[in-house]
Image (cartoon, grey):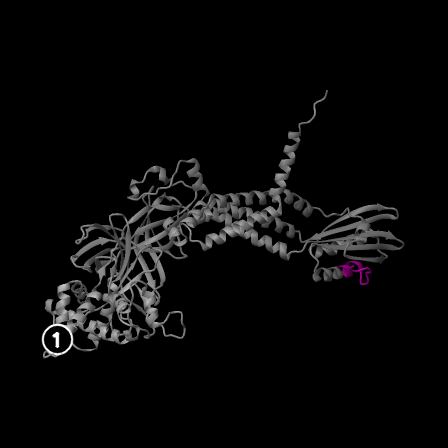
């Protein structure tokens, strides 16, 4: 009994063919390209390689977790993106392997074996009688004429019932099919270059080489070898931060769950960083004067790196990416905002921290020096608007635009002005919670004649800074406002200020009226000074006075009562300011416009200052700036592959779109006293040029009166 073939064995070739057909199909390739386009859009819209906290702050915990799980924060190095590129390479390669041999064979083939009857079916066809000319002579004449104008020609002799006939077969425009092969090969090369210069090789070292991302802190020299990549790593792209006067030989490769350290075969020393700005404050040019120190030979090579002008050494490109602070030294003065806090000075470097103790509660605080910005340009092109600021909802841009008009309003005048240096720092409590502060070194004059210090604060990096605007006193500093702030919190000084105000406002002959006024003023000043509620929140300022009036004053009388109460409050605060100046040994405030502007803003600022969430303000007193240059270093062998692929893609698309493949056949059959010619032309695209070309050729080859023409 004979063995039957296995059904599973028969299914395997069929499954293999089906899988190959799927991978090589155009629909599959288009689907992959569509997914790649969608992923590229996501990678463009969504910021890549940001800290996880930034995604949580922007999108919320659920979506941030989903984005991180799908690697949407690092689309171009995600495993699924690399897998899609790999499938596209396989699909396109199979497509080339299946069709390229046929196309190449078709390019070599003249198709001279076509039958006479088949020529009658062509769109472009013509016939003519060539009297007195033998088929062979006619064939050679026609072949020479076609060859002289660039056609490739082949002649074939055939035996017919009436004698020897000749077929003239010619072709032109074979580059059209070469263009197809070139365009598809270009896709393969570009994808291979992308895979080579992408994260694939680094990922392979993580998967198979035991390399893991480093998520901790500390010194680079203390990082273990499993987090470092060798100098021989064939492809990488990372960042190198070098401060002026220092050198570095280790690049940082950002990963979604940490960083990898890439060792370089040389060290980059930053001799000088150069930055120039436009009037808007935007960088116009930044460049780095560097020295490259070869580790193996000790060779020293000076170079200059600018944007779009990289330096190259041992196959590694050094690009100017951006610039940063290189550890500037700052000196800050702590100014108390609440009673019990003391004034002191502290020094540190950007990126460092200093341990402090809250003098009122004994709580441990950490002062972190976040950033120093020497240039801050704002628009001061208009002088309209109202005074006042609310630390709860006003940031610097909103504050200035509310007074001056937004910079994008072309109907307003733009006056860009540098408002001077600023410092950013964080105060972190023992539980690890931190608030970020941004204070300007110099007062800002927004155009109303009263310069103000801008004290910014925000709870999270996702929020804009909210600014408390503090008026500059007659001595040009913060002291006047801070003295009023501390005195306002002291019940004894409030009571003394109220008595002085009542004595000035009421004739001394009417003591009972002075007592009533003092009582009302003390009540208003106490409400304004504020007190903490059961939840520990401060309730005071102008909001507390407004709440009191809504509760205790009939609506019809609120406007008049409010005017009286505000006038009393202003008078009491003026006397409080005079008292603090006397205690500081300063002359009293004069009765002029400057004093009025100071007091107007001081009333608003003292109200908002109760919401300032820190016991002290750190004022920038001095700094020594140190610049750092951020370089992108890349070893990209796939770059040349991509360039070759782009060249082939351009040539291939040009060939497919603008090169027409044409074939001409002329069958020459003997007849009485001459030859009968049948001519046909085929082209891969029907165009008006094709019809005109056939008419011209048929006239030249067959004589001036061919019959038949284009169908």
Indicate left or right for 258 with 575 as reference.
right
Decide if residue 455 is in sight here: yes
Magenta region, main secondary structure: loop
Residue 607 place in picture, x, y as percent: 24, 66
Q: Residue at x 43, y 37 (%)?
A: 207
Instruction: Determine if the magenta segment contains residue 707.
Output: yes
Residue 301 place in picture, x, y as percent: 34, 50
Instruction: Determine if the magenta segment contains residue 200.
Output: no
Indicate left or right for 152 with 295 as reference.
right
Q: Quadrant of the C terminus?
A: bottom right
Outermost right residue: 672
Q: Residue at x 52, y 48 (%)?
A: 190
215 in relation to 436, above or below: above
Residue 215 place in picture, x, y as percent: 34, 43
| Mark 1 Cα-neighbour bin, 10 Å: few <14, some 14–19, many ≥20 | few
706 in relation to 113, above or below: below
Q: Magenta part of the protein: which range?
A: 697-711
Residue 553 place in picture, x, y as percent: 27, 71
Give the total number of marks visible in the rendering: 1
Indicate left or right for 682 with 409 as reference.
right
| Location of mark 1 (residue) | 512
Q: Does dot 1 land on a helix, a strand or a loop?
A: helix
Q: Residue at x 28, y 73 (%)?
A: 558
Which sits in the foreground, 116 or 415?
415
Which sits in the foreground, 239 or 3?
3
């Amino acid at each position: 009994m004979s063995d039957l073939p296995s059904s599973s064995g028969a299914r395997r070739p069929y499954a293999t063919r089906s899988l190959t057909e799927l991978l090589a199909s155009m629909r599959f390739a288009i689907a992959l390209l569509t997914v790649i386009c969608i992923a590229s859009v996501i990678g463009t819209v969504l910021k890549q390689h940001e800290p996880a906290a930034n995604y949580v702050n922007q999108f919320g915990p659920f979506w941030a977790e989903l984005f991180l799980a799908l690697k949407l924060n690092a689309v171009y190095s995600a495993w699924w993106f690399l897998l899609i590129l790999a499938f596209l390479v396989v699909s396109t390669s199979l497509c080339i392997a299946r069709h390229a041999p046929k196309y190449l064979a078709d390019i070599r083939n003249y198709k001279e074996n076509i039958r006479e009857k088949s020529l009658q079916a062509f769109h472009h066809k013509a016939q003519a009688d060539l009297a007195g000319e033998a088929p062979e002579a006619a064939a050679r004449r026609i072949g020479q004429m076609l060859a002289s104008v660039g056609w490739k020609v082949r002649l074939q002799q055939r035996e017919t019932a009436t004698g020897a006939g000749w077929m003239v077969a010619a072709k032109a425009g074979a580059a059209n099919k070469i263009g197809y092969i070139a365009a598809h090969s270009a896709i393969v090369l570009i994808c291979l270059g992308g895979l080579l210069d992408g994260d694939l090789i680094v990922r392979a070292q993580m998967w198979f080489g035991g390399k893991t991302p480093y998520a901790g802190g500390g010194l680079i020299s203390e990082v273990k070898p499993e987090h470092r990549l060798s100098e021989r790593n064939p492809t990488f792209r990372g960042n190198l931060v070098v401060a002026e006067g220092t050198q570095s030989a280790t690049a940082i490769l950002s990963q979604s769950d940490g960083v990898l350290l890439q060792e370089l075969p040389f060290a980059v020393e930053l001799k000088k960083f150069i930055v120039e700005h436009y009037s808007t404050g935007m960088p116009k040019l930044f460049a780095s004067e560097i020295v490259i120190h070869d580790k193996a030979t000790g060779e020293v090579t000076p170079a200059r790196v600018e944007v779009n002008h990289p330096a190259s050494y041992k196959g590694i490109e050094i690009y100017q990416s951006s610039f940063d602070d290189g550890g500037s030294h700052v000196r800050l003065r702590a100014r108390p905002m609440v009673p019990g806090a003391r004034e002191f000075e502290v020094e540190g470097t950007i990126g460092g921290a200093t341990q402090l103790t809250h003098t009122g509660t004994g709580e441990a605080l950490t002062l972190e020096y976040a950033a120093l910005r020497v240039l801050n340009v704002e628009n001061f092109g208009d002088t309209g608007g109202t005074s006042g600021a609310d630390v709860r909802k006003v940031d610097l841009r909103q504050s200035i635009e509310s007074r001056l008009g937004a910079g994008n309003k072309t109907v307003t005048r733009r006056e860009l002005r540098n408002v001077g240096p600023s410092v950013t720092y964080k105060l972190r409590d023992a539980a690890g919670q931190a608030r970020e502060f941004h204070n300007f070194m110099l007062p800002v004059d927004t155009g109303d004649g009263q310069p103000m210090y801008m004290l910014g604060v925000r709870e999270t990096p996702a929020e804009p800074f909210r600014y408390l605007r503090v008026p500059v006193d007659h001595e040009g500093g913060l002291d006047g406002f801070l003295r009023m702030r501390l005195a306002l919190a002291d019940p004894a000084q409030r009571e003394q200020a109220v008595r002085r105000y009542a004595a000035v406002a009421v004739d001394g002959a009417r003591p009972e009226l002075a007592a009533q006024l003092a009582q009302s003023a003390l009540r208003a000043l106490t409400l304004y000074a504020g007190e903490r509620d059961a939840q520990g929140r401060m309730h005071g300022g102008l909001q507390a006075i407004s709440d009191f009036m809504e509760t205790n004053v009939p609506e019809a009388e609120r406007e008049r009562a409010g005017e009286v109460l505000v006038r009393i409050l202003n008078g009491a605060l003026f006397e409080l300011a005079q008292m603090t100046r006397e205690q500081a040994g300063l002359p009293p405030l004069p009765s002029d416009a400057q004093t009025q502007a100071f007091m107007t803003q001081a009333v608003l600022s003292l109200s908002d200052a109760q919401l300032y969430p820190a016991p002290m303000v750190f004022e920038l007193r001095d700094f020594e700036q140190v610049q750092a240059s951020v370089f992108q270093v890349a070893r990209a062998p796939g770059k040349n592959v991509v360039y070759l692929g782009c060249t082939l893609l351009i040539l291939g698309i040009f060939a497919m779109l603008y090169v027409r493949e044409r074939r001409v056949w002329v069958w020459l059959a003997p007849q009485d006293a001459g030859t009968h010619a049948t001519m046909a032309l085929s082209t891969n695209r029907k165009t008006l040029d094709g019809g005109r070309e056939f008419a011209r050729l048929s006239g030249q080859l067959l004589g001036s009166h061919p019959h038949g023409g284009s169908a």
